[in-house]
Amino acid sequence: MSARRYQLDSHAVDVAKLAQTLQFEFSKRTAPNRLVKTAMSETLASWHPTTLDARGLPTKELIELYKRWGESTWGIITTGEVMIDYEHITDAARPTITISAPFRGERFEGFQALAAAMKRNGSIAIAQVCHPGRSVREVWVKETISASPTTQDPFLGFLRFAPARAATVSDIENITQTFAHVAAYLEAAGFDGIQLQCAQGFLLSQFLSPATNKRSDAYGGSTTNRMRLVKEICTAIRACTQPDFVLSIKMNSVEFQKDGLTTEDAAELVKGWQDAAVDYVELSGGTFEQLAQKAGVRKRESTKKREAFFLEFAERIVPALGPEHKRKTKVVVTGGLRTAEGMLAALEVVDAVGIARPAVQEPALAGDLLDGRVTSAIWPVTPFDSDFILSVRAAYSQIRAIGQGYEPFDLSDEEVAGKLIQDLHLWWEWFLSTKGDVPAGYGHADYTGRLVPHSAC
């Protein structure tokens, strides 16, 4: 039985614009098309509870996952969060490169293999790099840093975060040097570029947002000051990489919280990123989906029709880059795009479209769209089509299946979805029993239904 899709494949759509190349002004690199596989955390790198340098090594499962995306024809493929410290991490089993990592050895060879897997069919390979700032659990560190003193509220009532002190000037210099070292390391390993994770509430976002940056020095106050750290990182990266190394930033188009980043702030930031020679900016929206889901907020009718969650904000941000013929920094919008028609409509505003969860369900989606085999993504059955958190947990399970050499199970199949719900429920009960203890309480649920080996397809 064929999978249920958002749009009938018999519906004629001219995807020529999606297939157009995209040249970046500063690096002079060219993406082969306008489809971007955006970052999703994988939780497939190595992990050890006490031996720090045994953490964050690319595994064969992680490389297999990216090989599958690399087999398709994505214009850009972006990794999940690469950490820059063994202890200041968003979660266990994240790929990690520290400031002391040498350009040789097992870790370096793992990142070389990862880059090669991503680039096997001509995609641009980008590594998203992140420091979580205040979003570090106290099970890993007793104190962390942020723009200002703060402690993040516990997650689920029992996953507690370490208190954060305000980063000193010395901390800021170290962070800048570390990001630059990681960029040079990635370039040497074969990656085409780096994406700075300046969204979703992590450290660089904490400096950018007036909600979390209460500093009164050169790194706080005005928008110019709040963006100073990120601009210094960009300058340091440009100084230690080749001119053709791609520099990208992922940022919030708006923050749905008190004193948070506004769309007007975002427009000013984008203008600053262009001044900092950033090749492209990916616009997202922080944690709006999760907050909206918890609060029962419905999508606006305009959003439903246009698919992209944050396109209306992009329309107000992109003009800050100047007249179209003078813009140097390209813009990617991510979130909610499911049909070729929706993607083409987004290209009337931005330069490329980002896809995450649908790319997990269908690693070859880019090639299938461009070749006309499909005109939309697979449409998951309820509740996976409407519950954001549940759909992310399902994607993690699919990521695990792909990494183990299987085809991702079909979430448009009622029987498959029912089995997965059972697996997720059992895993969640186990996770709650661990109280998030490490090494026990990390990872994601394995789907225990029938899986088809990729080699059989």
Image (cartoon, grey):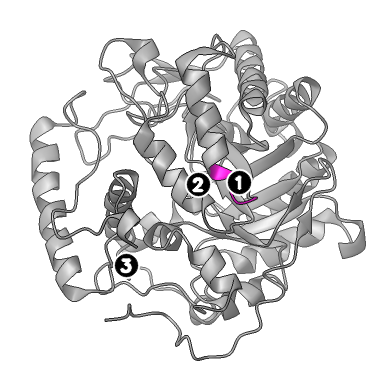
Q: Depth check: 368 or 147 in front?
A: 368
Q: Which mark is residue 251?
A: 1
Identify the image quadrant of residue 434. top left
Q: Label 3 amino acid?
A: Gly
Q: Picture coordinates of residue 22 (x, y %)?
A: 76, 58
Secondary structure state at the residue bearing disc 1: strand
| Discs 3/2, front | 2
Quarter where residue 444 is shown: top left
Describe residue 229's horizontal placement relative to residue 391 as left or right: right
Q: Which residue is mark 3?
A: 296
- Which of discs 3 and 1 lies nearer the camera? The answer is 1
Magenta stretch, main secondary structure class: loop
Amino acid carrying label 1: it is Met
**Percent x, y for residue 242?**
79, 28
- Tell me the quadrant of the picture where the N terminus can be found: bottom left
**Residues at badges 1 and 2 in contact (C-beta under 8 Å)?**
no
Q: Position of residue 255 (x, y in %)?
A: 53, 51
Q: Which residue is mark 2?
A: 39
Is residue 166 shown in magenta?
no
Q: In the displayed structure, does residue 402 sit left or right of residue 106?
A: left
Q: Residues within 10 Å of mark 3 (few under 14, many from 20)?
A: few
Specify the label residue 18 is tagged with. Answer: none
The span picked out in magenta is 118-122
Report the Cα–Cα distance between label 3 and label 1. Answer: 25 Å
- Which sits earlier in the primary sequence, circle 3 or circle 1? 1
